[in-house]
Image (cartoon, rainbow, N blue to C red):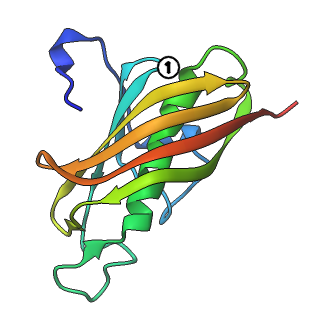
């Protein structure tokens, strides 16, 4: 998925806004920045893969585990869920599963992972999303994600 950022109004989530959006904290926050491309429809996240990550300590040329790439896509999808009109505000989003996952190539230390997530379906508090993780236009992983949103009241 390629979005021309100049054609749409974007809203960025930096680290403090990501911490407000997600319940995760270091070292489990796996997204550095989120740009809302179309509210409630699609977002683009960014993750810099560094040697300081807990999973890469002491391993030269380490590759980010694919399960963590899936989790990064799920965390990025939180920005889509937050923008949905019915039921998402004041609710809690739970990552329920990933289907049709395809592993293409590893994301290595020193690369920047781009996380594209778009809404496929929203019905009765259940979201189906399509996620694509890329590094320099090379696909790392694709997956269909299921997120469930429940009211906190």
| Residue 5 x, y percent position in the rendering | 20, 20
Q: Is residue 125 left or right of residue 152?
A: left
Q: Residue at x 71, y 28 (%)?
A: 125
Q: Categorize mark 1 by other alpha carbons within 10 Å: few (<14), some (14-19), many (20+).
A: some
Give the answer, above or below, for where 30 lies relative to 122: below
Identify which residue, 153 or 63, lies in the foreground: 63
Which residue of the protein is positioned furthest toward the right in this rendering? 153
Q: Is residue 99 left or right of residue 4?
A: right
Q: Residue at x 67, y 32 (%)?
A: 126
Q: Give the secondary structure at mark 1.
A: loop
Quadrant of the image containing the N terminus: top left
Asked where in the image residue 101 lies, by quadrant, the reply is: bottom left
| Residue 93 x, y percent position in the rendering | 66, 40
Counting the numbered discs, the total is: 1
Asked where in the image residue 147 lies, by quadrant, the reply is: top right
Q: Is residue 130 left or right of residue 132?
A: right
Quadrant of the image containing the C terminus: top right
Asked where in the image residue 20 lies, by quadrant, the reply is: top right
Can residue 109 be seen in this snapshot?
yes
Which residue of the protein is positioned furthest toward the bottom in this rendering? 58
| Residue 47 x, y percent position in the rendering | 30, 52
Can residue 30 be seen in this snapshot?
no
Q: Residue at x 34, y 41 (%)?
A: 33
Give the answer, above or below, for where 26 lies relative to 128: below
Q: Which residue is mark 1?
A: 40
Which residue of the protein is positioned furthest toward the left in this rendering? 136
| Residue 17 x, y percent position in the rendering | 48, 36
Give the answer, above or below, for where 30 lies relative to 1: below
């Amino acid at each position: 998925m390629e979005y021309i950022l100049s054609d749409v109004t974007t809203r960025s989530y930096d680290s403090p806004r990501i911490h407000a959006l997600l319940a995760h904290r270091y070292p489990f926050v796996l997204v550095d920045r989120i740009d809302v491309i179309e509210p409630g429809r699609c977002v683009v996240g960014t993750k810099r893969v560094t040697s300081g990550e807990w999973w890469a300590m002491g391993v030269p040329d380490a590759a980010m585990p694919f399960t963590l790439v899936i989790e990064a896509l799920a965390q990025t999808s939180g920005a889509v869920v937050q923008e949905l009109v019915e039921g998402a505000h004041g609710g809690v989003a739970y990552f329920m599963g990933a289907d049709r996952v395809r592993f293409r190539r590893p994301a290595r230390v020193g690369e920047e992972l781009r996380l594209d997530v778009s809404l496929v379906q929203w019905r009765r508090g259940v979201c189906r999303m399509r996620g694509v993780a890329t590094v320099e236009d090379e696909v790392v992983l694709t997956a269909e994600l299921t997120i469930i949103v429940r009211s906190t009241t």
